[in-house]
Image: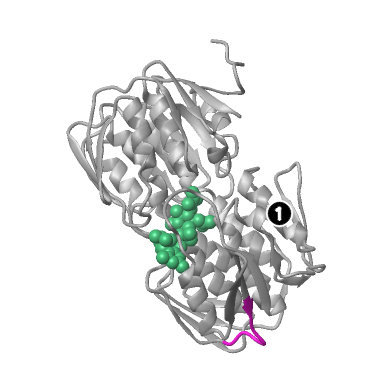
Amino acid sequence: MDRFVIEGGRPLSGEIGVMAAKNAVLPILAASIMAAEGETVLRNIPAIQDVATLIKLMGTMGVKAHFNADNSIKIDASGLKTFHADYDLVRRMRASVLVMGPLLARMGKCEVSLPGGCNIGARPIDQHLKGFEQMGVTFEESEGYIIGTVGELQGGKVYFDRPTHTGTENIMMAAVMARGTTEIINASCEPEVKDLADFLIAMGAKIKGAGTPYMIIEGVDTLTGVEYRPMGDRLEAGTYLLAAMATRGDIKIEGIRPIDLGLAIRKMEEMGAEITTTDSSVALRMLGRPARTDVITMPFPGFPTDLQPMVTSVLALGEGTSYLRETVFENRFLHTMELARLGADIRVQGDTATIDGVPRLKGAAIMASDIRGGAGLVVAGLAAEGITEVMRVYHIDRGYDRIEKSLTRLGARIQRVNKGEYRS
Ligand code: EPU
């Protein structure tokens, strides 16, 4: 099993670009299932485990999807032959539920194993199911599978109790091929939802209001394959920017829209970073120790929950006491126990972490337990004095395309090693 060995304490510096966002690529791949005709080509796609898992799942359904050496994926969904999504693949990744909308739209049926994925809370899919039911789908559960059936999807009003990211995407995909008009009320405003809408519109869908809480979707009969370049990975960019803060570095990230980072840029400034942006890049310079601040994670445009573990690592080195409240996922604090092994002083009570900043962290062996939590540990390891070993990097590989390569380009000393292979 791979692990990272990090020689910390070096400021990150330099300039890199990011590839397409995992959380845009996954729904877009799922949506490509809906093109009964024409080939879809997706560009600038990262070679990450979650993309490989979804391609495999689509393959079991008769959809030809091929990841090419130039980081493009070609998809031919004309041969879709089944509505069954197998447990063995779905359990590896929660985003597999994104095939529900496309399967219901094309086949009127879906049979999807209850999802697995990251260890960050219960994460039910009740809001997805409630939304589909509003569109005429009936559900039954059998042997760990959810089976949805509908004669013809009907437009209607779908209300979400809270803005769910993949829930909004699932309902939007079903609605683009439903009869009549669908309104989504309290939709997720995450930039990846808007990117999926742009892809669907390119395929022939009629969608208004994507990126706002109120969406209107007019059903169409068919969608056609297109060529598309999904948005850049704002969360990968945010990870490197926060790593530069923790190491007091000076870096520039190309390929994202700063506005897509929501409140994160403002919080970085509050902690003392000097930030310069263009329409498609963010540069960050950090001179001293981070200033204390309070962070509340919220749906977009609030502070992204996916950057919470990385900002925890920065605040662990901050001056004074910071409070961090996680309002999106109830179990997203596992990384704090590992950070304590590096010398961080963090107490978690309920949804709030109290972080008493320390002047320095010291390297130790620590373990990743989910994608972003793992990336947060890497950020801490880059800042810690001495050697940090991060175990179970397969979690990180689900969402980052060789994170160690990008970090090495930014001057970090980080190596991927297998058992006992490391030589200093
Ligand atoms: N929720 C429900 N019922 C539902 C759906 C969601 O109670 O039917 C709850 C969840 O349990 C959670 C909250 O609503 O407490 C928000 O969940 P949401 O549905 O928005 O999250 P998601 O769609 O499962 C996506 C990303 C996550 C990201 C969140 C929040 C993808 C594939 N995943 O998850 O990304 O953290 O939105 O923005 O887009 C990651 O990339 O590492 C990752 C976990």
- The residue that mark 1 highlights is 55
Residue 374 image point, x, y percent: 46, 37
Q: Which of 25 and 258 lies nearest the eye of the viewer?
A: 25
x and y percentages locating residue 232 in the rendered image = 54, 49
Q: How far across and down, in percent of the image, does residue 188 sit?
A: 43, 67
**Residue at horizontal 31 percent and vertical 30 percent from the top:** 340
> Is 37 left, or right, of 231 in this rendering?
right
Numbered disc 1: secondary structure: helix
Compare residues 118 and 5 and report the one nearer the observer. 118
Query: What residue sits 43% from the left and 54% below the top?
Result: 260
Q: Is residue 364 above or below residue 355?
A: above
User: Between residues 317 and 277, which one lies in front from this camera angle?
Assistant: 317
- Identify the residue shown where x is 53% and y is 46%: 255
Circle 1: residue type: Ile
Q: Is residue 353 above or below residue 194?
A: above
State the image coordinates of residue 84 (x, y, percent, origin top left): 71, 67
Q: In the rendered view, does 372 fall on the left or right side of 385? A: right
Residue sticking out furthest to the top: 424
Q: Note whether 357 is above or below 395 in the view shown.
A: above
Characterize the magenta stretch by its predominant secondary structure.
loop
Q: Residue at x 46, y 51 (%)?
A: 279
Chain part drawn in magenta: 148-154
Label 1, ligand 1: CB separation under 8 Å: no
